[in-house]
Amino acid sequence: MPEDKITEALRFANEPLSLSEPLREDGDAELGDVVEDRGAASPFEVAATSLLPDEIARLLAPLDEREREILKLRFGLDRENQELWKKLANTLT
């Protein structure tokens, strides 16, 4: 490996880098364009989450109110924490 490449690699290891720093001298891409944000939701997750409430409502529509309520409580479909079986039994009795 050429000495200048080693020197450059060592420089990157020791200096903080700006996310706005270009990746290459001849390109438009910046370091921030390729750094993964592990806390961000994937595009699939965002799409699935936004479509989920309508899909759940569509699937539950044929059921009567009591059946819908049972499934919502059991599986946490109303966006609240999933209920335990004991709490479900107490709610419906």
Image (tube, grey):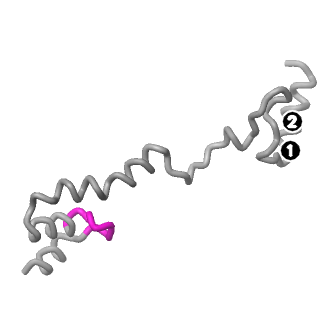
Left/right of residue 20 with respect to residue 3 in the rendered view: left
Query: Magenta stretch: residue 16 in it?
Result: no
Q: CA distance from mark 2 to mark 1?
A: 6 Å
Left/right of residue 82 with respect to residue 41 in the rendered view: left
From the image, which quarter does the C terminus lie in? bottom left
The secondary structure making up most of the magenta span is loop
Q: Amino acid at mark 1?
A: Asn
Left/right of residue 47 with respect to residue 72 in the rendered view: right
Q: Residues within 10 Å of mark 1 (few under 14, many from 20)?
A: few
Residue 83 vertical placement versus 21 (above, below): below
From the image, which quarter does the N terminus lie in? top right
Q: Amino acid at mark 2?
A: Leu
Determine the residue located farthest toward the top in the rendered image: 1
Residue at 87% across, 27% down = 6
User: Which mark, by number, is residue 10?
Assistant: 2
Q: Nearer the viewer, residue 10 or 38?
A: 38
Residue 33: x and y in percent read 69, 40
Left/right of residue 74 with respect to residue 10 in the rendered view: left
Residue 50 vertical placement versus 79 (above, below): above
User: Which mark, by number, is residue 82?
Assistant: none
Residue 58 vertical placement versus 73 (above, below): above
Residue 52: x and y in percent read 32, 54
Residue at 77% across, 33% down = 28
Q: Nearer the viewer, residue 81 or 7?
A: 81
Q: Quadrant of residue 80?
A: bottom left
The reply to whether callout 2 and callout 1 are in contact (CB within 8 Å) is yes
Residue indicated by mark 1: 14
Residue at 16% across, 70% down = 69
Magenta region = 74-82
